[in-house]
Amino acid sequence: MEVVVIETRPLGDRSYVVHDGGVALVIDPQRDTDRVEAAAAQAHVRITHVAETHLHNDYLSGGLILARAHGAVYLVNGADAVGFERTPIADGGTVRVGRLTVKAIATPGHTHHHLSYVVTDGQDQAVFSGGSLLYGSVGRTDLVSPADTVPLTHAQYSSVRRLTAEARPEAALYPTHGFGSFCSSGPASSAHASTIGEQQQSNHAFTDPDEDHFVQELISNLSAYPSYYAHMAPANMTGPGPADLAVPESVDPDELSRRLAAGEWVVDLRRRVAFAASHLKGSVSFEYGRGSSFTAYLGWVLPWNRQLTLLGAEGDVENAIRDLSRIGIDSPDAALGTDPSALAPGTAVVHYPRVDWHGLRQGSLRDVVLDVRRTDEYDAGHLAGAVNIPLHELLLRMPEIPAGKVWVHCASGYRSGVAASLLQRAGRDVVHVDAKYPPS
């Protein structure tokens, strides 16, 4: 048995191609299925089966697209009321994929109908746990509804124990979430590989002997999650279509100026340092980087289902289009280039100061210090007198910010860069504190 890992770092997730050298099972593929196609081609294997551990809340699935393209068996829990044809599978169901034996195990917790898959090839065994057992933690249990959170957390505690009864301690563990995904909960590990036995020794879902305490602690530590999650599971129930990953022709300069003047969302992908120094008035900064949280924060912060225009180098625009397609933000327009004045000559080019903590200390006591970290981060420690409005709430809570110059910070400089651009767009006098918290 060979396992090919396909990482989606911007969302903190993994998909898997599991094969015996001839045929393959794909688990939890994302919507941009060309990555899976390339992995299968490189391994010289044929995709015969595709399986979902659950109806995902943090991305659009590519499972239906992939299964149709290959005439593959599409395994989805029969209890999920999906709007497309699939091969229903339930707890204990077993499927042969070449030499591989694939057994579905009911592991409710992250969702009601969550399945994990135990794959066996002779003496080798692997567990694909989706959003159930993660490295150092488990999948969050509050995505269904407030009324379901407590029972699902109890179910999560039981589900991980079910996995230890079904799989050997030496079985390799391959979760879908847990690599930065907001679908994770608890004290996530930085590990990149693990086994069932290792998790039994270190994961708090096993080491806490008191189920009620585990439930209370996990729920109390759950933090905010992106608002676009509300759109993912419903879309996955109907079956997402293929993504259009083509880079569109660059928007005409006059049209770009018109969009900015009309208050449309023009997203500058350049580095936040470059944006602070020079950018088109009315544009907003979402720095693009392959390891950044660009996708999650853009989908969380900006109004849903509005037309976007991406501004930046062609490579960054191309990658951003791919990333956004994974959460259902389709067909953004583009203005290709890195010189703002050349992209829209009819629009003013503006800037704002960017400082470190030393620069903040030079501010006036009458100024406003705005902390845009999440509430749980702020509660764990903050600057005296700082106003806390999490970035994902900023657009709706602008009127709460006191009058005066606003010095905005976060934990690393990324979120505060987004916030500074939103504040300036709203007409505020802003300074971007681009430094790691806490101050050194």
Image (cartoon, grey):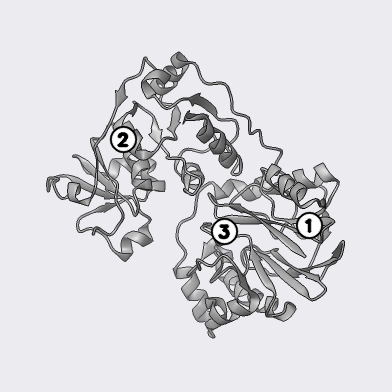
User: What residue does disc 1 label?
Assistant: 25
Residues at circles 3 and 1 in contact by the CB criterion of under 8 Å: no
- Classify 233 as above or below 317: below
- In the image, is 311 to the left or to the right of 98? left
Write down the residue under mark 3: 143
Identify which residue is drawn at 74% across, 78% down.
166
In the rendered image, residue 197, in percent from the top left (x then y), is placed at 63, 80
- Which element is circle 3 on? loop
- 278 to 375, vertically: above or below: above
How far apart are labels 1 and 2 at the CA level? 47 Å
Image height check: is 323 above or below 47? Answer: above
From where the camera sits, is residue 426 visible?
no
Residue drawn at 36 percent across, 51 percent down? 390
Disc 2 marks a residue whose amino acid type is Ala
The local secondary structure at tag 1 comes to strand
Kind of residue indicated by mark 1:
Leu
Cβ–Cβ under 8 Å for marks 1 and 2? no
Amino acid type of disc 3? Leu
Q: Which residue is mark 2?
A: 276
Query: What residue lies at 47% left-to-right and 42% top-to-bottom?
Result: 298
Of badges 2 and 3, the one in the foreground is 2
